[in-house]
Image: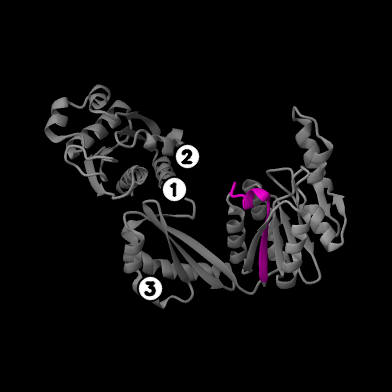
Amino acid sequence: MKAEIIAVGTEILLGQITNTNATFISQFLAELGIEVYYQSAVGDNSQRLTDVLTTAAKRSDVIVVCGGLGPTDDDLTKETVAEFLGESLVYDTEAMNRLNDFFKYSTNPMTENNKRQALTISNSLTIQNPTGLACGTYYEGKDTNYILLPGPPSELKAMVREEVIPLLKEKMPQSHQLVSRYLRFMGIGESKIVTELKEILDEQTNPTIAPYAKSNEVMLRITAKCTNEDKGEAMLDELERRIQDKVGNYFYGYGENITIEEILVNELKQRKQTVSFAEGMTGGEFQHRVTNIEGSSDVFSGGIVAYTRESKEKLLSIPDVLMFKHGEVSDECVTAMAVAARTALNATYGVSAVGVAGPKEIDGQPVGTIIIGISTPIGEFTEHLLIRRNRSYIRDGAVKHGLNFLRKHLV
């Protein structure tokens, strides 16, 4: 079955927003066994959208149109598609009730154009919007099926997960589907992991492996084409076992969008333990990322940013003689910082980072030098890194590797 995605919005053509919806839609269709053959973007113009629909209907079994379902005059998708199909627009009762409920508690009255968001195409199924106001539409044509979704990604994704995927599984069951798993690795680059997995990569047919280079980490997507999910998961289990045998020392977690800070926070919560930070070169980034995670208040004791030698002495009581003898970028300094963070803030673990983010060396240490320190109930440990990239990449590496360094000690 061939699918096509049409993104509607002049802002996409002007480069004012990135069309992330197309990526998401392609992924979920592929997982259902529906292959995407074409993607296009068109501005907020009824005639040009009609032209694109005319072409798409000749070559695709499923057309997904996203964007242009809002209340303004340039939101023309429903009207244009309805006219193209020879259907009328009608109000959906449930969608209208959602609108009325929303404006009942709003300080603004519902205007006439707001009601457009509750319109759907006659002889179609309405796709309700659990996070927004504009409903979507599923229309079964003679040769082509049409799915209309709103443009805001948060709304589109929620509708797809809650409404569209179950609907397509019922209406368009496929003999095969794709099952994917995402493996995250840190401390190994893309070229190195590909080299280590060369034998597996050379012989792959089904399942397949796709490597992705991320900032200071690598992700592998492993995908199986299968007749049902259980068989696909079994195929992925075997492939993952072979991968872990080769590069499992660098593995830190599962998930396309998971982060090391999420994994660490969850691990600490399960153990009912806490962490504090003493930061030099990272300037508070450890604390920022950890506190972005829901539930971090259960595990985060606090942190101190001691960017200069003077602040390390005053805020962390690091003896000036220690820094004079060993330097700020040293095992001795980073260890003293980690101990100070743990004891001063009464945490289970203290994590610290010092280094040289640039533009020039410090204490004879080259740009890209990073030293991570952790203080634990059983002792102190350090890790050295050298990252030859720009300033932001170096700082990102310090944070990610620092959090992962603690995670490895936990597990």
Distance of mark 1 from mark 2, alpha carbons?
Answer: 10 Å
Q: Which callout, 1 or 2, points at the residue further toward the start of the chain?
A: 1
Residue 200 is tagged as 3
Q: Which residue is mark 1?
A: 259
Magenta residues span 2-17
- Residue 165 sits in which quadrant? bottom right
Front in this rendered view, residue 187 or 171:
187
Residue 293 is tagged as 2
Distance of mark 3 from mark 1, alpha carbons?
Answer: 26 Å
- The answer to whether residue 350 is left or right of residue 102 is left
Q: Residue at x 40, y 78 (%)?
A: 203
Name which residue type carries label 1.
Answer: Thr
Q: Position of residue 339 (x, y in %)?
A: 24, 32
Q: Which callout, 3 or 1, points at the residue further toward the start of the chain?
A: 3
Name which residue type carries label 3.
Answer: Ile
Task: Please rate how many residues cluster around mark 1, counting C-alpha atoms within 10 Å: few if below 14, some from 14 to 19, many from 20.
Answer: some
